[in-house]
Image (spheres, rainbow, N blue to C red):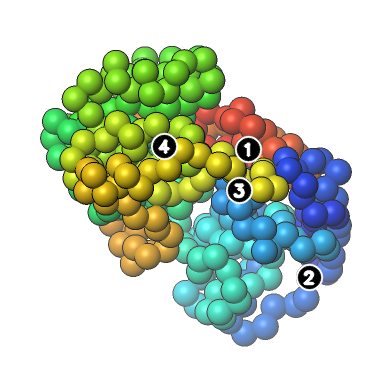
Amino acid sequence: MVNSRKIVITSPFKGEPKITDFKIETEELPPLQDGQMLCEAEYISVDPYQRAYSQRHKVGATMLGSQVSRIVESRSPDYPVGRHVVGYWGWCDRTVVNPAAKSGEILPPMLVQNYGDLPLSLSLGVLGMPGATAYFGLLDICDPKPGETVVVSGAAGAVGSIVGQIARIKGCKVIGIAGSDVKVKWLKEELGFDHAFNYKTVNVEKALKEAAPNGIDVYFDNVGGEQSSAVIANMRHRGRISVCGCISSYNESKVPLAPVIQRYMVGKELKMEGFFVGRWLDSWDQAFKEMAQWIKEGKLKYKETVTEGFQNTPKAFIGMLRGENLGKAVVKV
């Protein structure tokens, strides 16, 4: 008999989620059938999108999310025992799953490739969905050119910190917007951002004009709201905007108002495109190989905020939404 712990939703989120909105339950897992595998979670990911997917926040449901797990038993020839796999099975520590079945998951299970001595947890970060989001959202949608100016909001998070570094690798001037002085220092002193500022303590529009007096060519938007309107107002003719998320509004019960951007979109002939990174799923492995090489060469740095203990996953999730993490937030089960 194999038991699994799972963290379920006990009440609908009202504004910022609370610890009391979750509880741990135990369930007995069924024996494996042909094609199935039993996985034990080693790391669980907490990400902003988990708050945004409100249609999946049902009372009694296991909280959604991804994990990297070790395959401990398998009756699927393509998923051998001992390998690690990233799956979107929610906040649970053991899972029986048929990897070939279409089960409504956000993305299908993906075997973790061999990246040498790099940490396994990176398959939930720079070498996982956030890294792919940064890579394709910047390079495919915005096509940054050497010498151009790139602005990144949420710049100290799992996606934004990678976006800025890739832009630097491509020869761009990079400006990061973050929510604390500690994050600003990290962006400038460790990640090599040309400029960074704390949007809570400066006038965003004034800071942008000082850092980019000739305007902004590329904007990678994780945040939305007034902050993004200020960036868009300072873009150059035919600038490109990649929209990854809108974390500024995820805890709001009503859609917040922000200054209109249409006059800048039209007057400056800007291109703005939202995306879901699953669009490039067939190309993820190739992107990760390139990014792993950048890491080994010292061109691409990463930071993880690791919370210990399965029971602390809700705490890590709430902290991430508050912006308490540097880089990728994960839970070590």
- Where residue 118 sits, quadrant-wise, is top left
**Mark 3 = which residue?**
255
Q: CA distance from mark 3 to mark 2?
A: 41 Å
Q: CA distance from mark 2 to mark 4?
A: 49 Å
Q: Is residue 282 above or below residue 67?
A: below
**Mark 2 = which residue?**
29
Sequence order check, earlier mark of 4 and 3: 4
Q: SS for tag 4?
A: helix
Hey, what amino acid is under mark 2?
A: Leu
Report the quarter where the C terminus lies.
top right
Front residue of this view, candidates 154 and 285: 154
**Mark 4 = which residue?**
229
Sequence order check, earlier mark of 3 and 1: 3
Residue 321: numbered disc: 1
**Residue 320: horizontal and vertical position, in percent?**
62, 36
Q: Is residue 290 visible?
A: no
